[in-house]
Image (spheres, grey):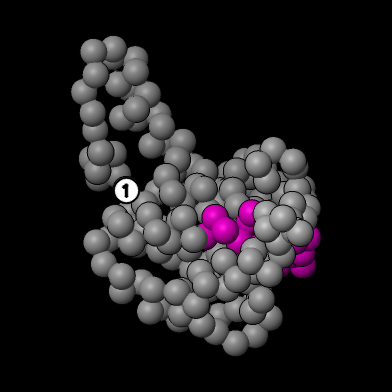
Amino acid sequence: NDYLGHFSCSVPDENSQRMINIWNPYQAERNFQFSRNLSYYATGTFRGVGFRDTAQDVLSMIPFDTARSREKICLLLTQQYGDGHVNHYFFPTEGYDPVTSIHSDDHLWIVHTVYQQLLEEGSTDFLSERVSYYDGGEGTVLEHIKRSIDFTMAHLGERGFPLMLRSDWNDQL
């Protein structure tokens, strides 16, 4: 009741209402907890915690629990390098080495996610919180965001568009 009580709507179709009020928040909670792993337990597969996926999952948690979403944002920011790019996948439970392939969009999802967090909290205090970089040192949340944007700006093509780097073509579009 505490979790689901943060949001509810009333629509004429009771199945739609149930989907909106119960099943979507339930799915959001599961994705937030397990970052789209295949089960409730470590899968043994090389899936890990995807930076982009987890940033998207945090978006669905923000309206329900800003403290938990803030904590997960900080976990994500620990996967950012000083130049602004991030580890594509990481393994906080298993302790495996991260997947370090550099993708065009992973690091930018944190900009949108932090923005939504600030809107929900109604304060910019979070921007001053200090979080470590993966390759050493630390910066404020605002500095992490700036480095995300700077990384993209440093990787533009000859016509000024961000380079696609690595990933599925449709992710980049």
Q: Nearer the viewer, residue 36 or 131?
A: 131
Give the residues in magenta: 92-110
From the top left corner, tell me how far across and down residue 142 is, in percent: 45, 74
User: Looking at the picture, does residue 124 appear above or below residue 89?
Assistant: below
Relative placement, left or right, of 130 versus 158 is left
Residue 65 part of the magenta segment: no
Q: Nearer the viewer, residue 123 or 53?
A: 123
User: Looking at the picture, does residue 128 appear above or below residue 4?
Assistant: below
Q: Nearer the viewer, residue 29 or 1?
A: 29
Badge 1 element: loop
Q: Residues within 10 Å of mark 1 (few under 14, many from 20)?
A: some
**Furthest residue toward front:** 159
The quadrant the N terminus occupies is top left
Q: Within the image, what quadrant is residue 83 found in?
A: bottom right
From the top left corner, tell me how far across and down residue 8 is, in percent: 24, 33
User: Looking at the picture, does residue 167 appear above or below residue 10?
Assistant: below
Q: What residue is drawn where x is 42% and y is 45%?
A: 60
Q: What residue is drawn where x is 74% and y is 41%?
A: 169
User: Looking at the picture, does residue 4 appear above or below residue 165?
Assistant: above
Q: Amino acid at mark 1?
A: Pro
Prevalent SS, magenta region: loop
Residue 49 shows in the view: no
Q: What residue is drawn where x is 38% and y is 79%?
A: 128
**Furthest residue toward bottom:** 137
From the top left corner, tell me how far across and down residue 91 is, in percent: 68, 61
The quadrant the C terminus occupies is top right
Q: Within the image, what quadrant is residue 147 found in?
A: bottom right
